[in-house]
Image (cartoon, coloured by chain):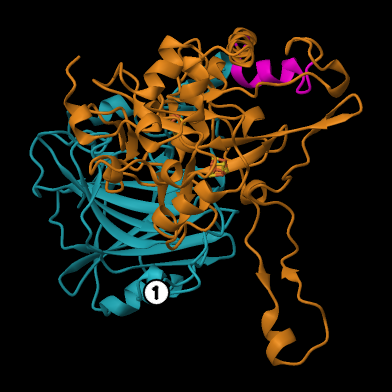
Amino acid sequence: MSKHQYAMVMDLNKCLGCQTCTIACKKLWTDRDGTGYMYWNNVETRPGLGYPRQWDRIGGGWKDGTLQPSPLPPMDDYGHAWEYNYEQRLYEGKKQPVMPSPEPQSGVNWDEDVGGMNADENYFFYLPRICNHCTYPACLEACPRKAIYKRDEDGIVVIDQERCQGYRYCIKACPYKKIYFNEVTGKSEKCIFCYPRLEKGEVNACAAQCPGRLRFVGLLDDPESPVHKLVLVHKIALPLFPEKGTQPNVFYVPPFNPPKRENYGKSILEDPRVPLDYLVYLFGAEVKDVITRLEAELKKAQEGGRSEVLQLLIGRDAETRFHVRPQLVQIQV
Amino acid sequence: MRTHLLMLIIATLLQPSAPIWAQTGAKPVAGQSLSVTASSAGIDTLLTGGPAAWNQIVAKRVALNRTPPLYDTDEPAAVEIPMLDVRLVRAGGKLLVCLSWRDTTHDAATLAAVPNTPPETRFRKVPTEADDRFFDAAAVMFPEKSGGGAIAPSLQMGDAEHPVEIYYWNATRGAMLMQAQGRSTTKRTGQTFPANGTYQNGQWNVTFELPDLPAGTTVAFAVWNGSQKDRDGRKYFSVWQVLE
Ligand code: SF4
Ligand code: SF4
């Protein structure tokens, strides 16, 4: 375990699915050779295939102290890059319509907004994903080169590009499939939690750019940080797939999950729009308690009271949402 | 899982050569010597002339072992490449090595060339074509300090007292020189060396140009089969052999 731990909380009730975070990350970190298919930050529609597709069903993580590696997801599951035949249409005067080639079969956010059906009502929400900078990183354990390390000062998990030999045991071990292989360099890459920005007092690019203002960043062990309050004090944010055993440090405020249309005024847990089973699948059984807590806060506010929790979740300004001033790194444990 | 482990241990014990533990901390036995032919042929002919250039050189057939599973999560692997033919020639002040082995799968690719211009100045970046393929490879390992001594280095990439040099060739990425002093310490030096590989009729012939190693030097060989997802210690290896 590291001395300190950076964490991020994302409030899924506020995500617009706009992909601004994805592009902010891509422009900053993965606009290089070999990185085209890499999305250190991706936003996927849930329920849905995810990226790479079915990543949540293929394995990875820990069970009884042993790694559970999955197969390597093939490029088919990420989707192959395609090009458009603009030249022949625009310059060669051919009459065929502009078409992508090879024919797209899959891709990032492939099943956007498809979601699922709950009886006769459609439902979906967006799930933004980055590396979870886990407390017990399966990727780190799997690397025979010891190329992956967890920074003692802030818990950020990074791959030493000098030591990495591209063996890809880490990709198989990560239950979130948040490591990508760069075939051009022959090395694996992952989200670095924007540590070069944090070290200058700037928040992560995905969080800075998010128009939904749903990302909260700080040290989990800093009592003043919003992540500490949301996760440890108010207990309304949960990690994804806790049973994978890696102890993620990215937490989600689950969708409030209003009841279905005809149930207006009823409790959130009664006949909800997003089937509760699905939220339990993603966040574990504790999600029910979290939703109950959120509902109580909502009720308080609706009755004219003041909810600290909701005020924090609104996250009006950067000072509320982010606690990354470099001096915070000095906090003593 | 347990039966599979047992079978691999048995398979390792049944290999025709001496078991691994007989190979560390002692000089290899006489049967493991490699003869070296002096040749007046040009280095280039030997390196790039293909199998024809080596026809006259007698081959030593060296048994290959498959590494037992190193981690309890290792996927099982059959022994598909049980042996390797080694030919050695001294020419032009160098030691030339030709390794030949049968491999029914040709696991090599031509990666797109990366332009010299920085990626941010280009509209198109070179894509990652595949993320799940591994390539055929081979290597020759010998102690960094020539002349040997009474004890051969650990077969697992040498040890702290006995660093090793590894001349590694990869069917896709080419030749790279590495150094190690024990398992998981292998480092690329950033240097390369002349090497050439050809694949014909289900057989690899790979030539390496090594420094002119003196008689008595111990050398060991390794082969990786890409289709068996070989990389790292997941590979075939020979025990130490001695140059005559
Ligand atoms: S999410 Fe995956 S890549 Fe990130 S630290 Fe956890 S196990 Fe490693
Ligand atoms: S930028 Fe914010 S609102 Fe937009 S997709 Fe990303 S997390 Fe959601």
The shade of chain A is: orange
For badge 1, the amino acid type reads Thr
Magenta-highlighted residues = A272-286
Few, some or many residues within 10 Å of mark 1 (<14, 14–19, 20+): few
- Tell me: B239 left or right of A18: left
Quadrant containing ligand 2: top right
Q: Which chain is cyan?
A: B
Q: Secondary structure at mark 1?
A: helix
Front-most of residues B138 and A292: A292
* Quadrant (top left/top right/bottom left/bottom right) for the N terminus of chain A: top left
- Residue drawn at (36%, 46%), measured in percent from left and top? A165
Q: Position of residue B92 (x, y in %)?
A: 18, 75
- The residue where tag 1 is placed is B121
User: Image quarter for residue A221?
Assistant: top left
- Residue drawn at (66%, 52%), measured in percent from left and top? A107
As for residue B197 lying within the magenta part, the answer is no
Question: Does A53 appear above or below A330?
Answer: below
Front-most of residues B110 and A128: A128
* Quadrant (top left/top right/bottom left/bottom right) for the C terminus of chain A: top left
Front-most of residues A38 and B49: A38
